[in-house]
Amino acid sequence: MKVVVDLNRCQAYAQCLYAAPGHFALHGREALVYDPSPDESARAEIERAVHACPVRAITASPDDTSAGEAA
């Protein structure tokens, strides 16, 4: 799975930290750090974080690495 946070849109409300604490963290007051490639088993937590973000800065999509692997 692929996670992208629009850091220009993010306002550091930190709702994602509560929804998926193992995948999002604040360093300092406003520097969001996140896991851009969480394991598929984290899907439920990541989806909660996507929906919890009040400014809709987080998007998550399936990781399509298997479709275009080089030989």
Image (cartoon, rainbow, N blue to C red):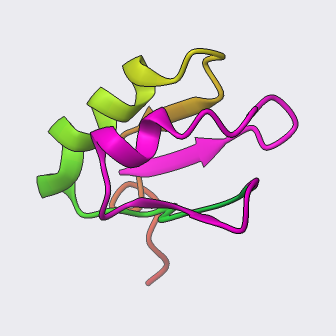
Percent across and percent down for residue 17 are 41, 48
Q: Vertical placement of 27 versus 42: above or below? A: below
| Left or right of 50 on screen, residue 19 | left
Residue lying furthest right: 8
Residue 55 shown in magenta: no
Residue 66 lies left or right of residue 30; in this view the side is left
Going 75% across and 38% down the picture, which residue do you hit?
6
Q: Which residues are magenta?
A: 1-30
- At which x and y percent is residue 5? 65, 42
Q: Residue at x 53, y 31 (%)?
A: 59
Residue 57 rendering spot, x and y as whole percentages: 65, 28
How many discs appear? 0
Query: In the rendered image, which quarter is residue 8 located in?
Result: top right
Residue at the outermost front position: 29
What residue is drawn where x is 61% and y is 33%? 13
Residue extending furthest toward the left: 41
Residue at 47% x, 65% y is: 35
Q: Is residue 21 magenta?
A: yes
Residue 64 % position (x, y): 40, 50
Front one among 3 and 29: 29
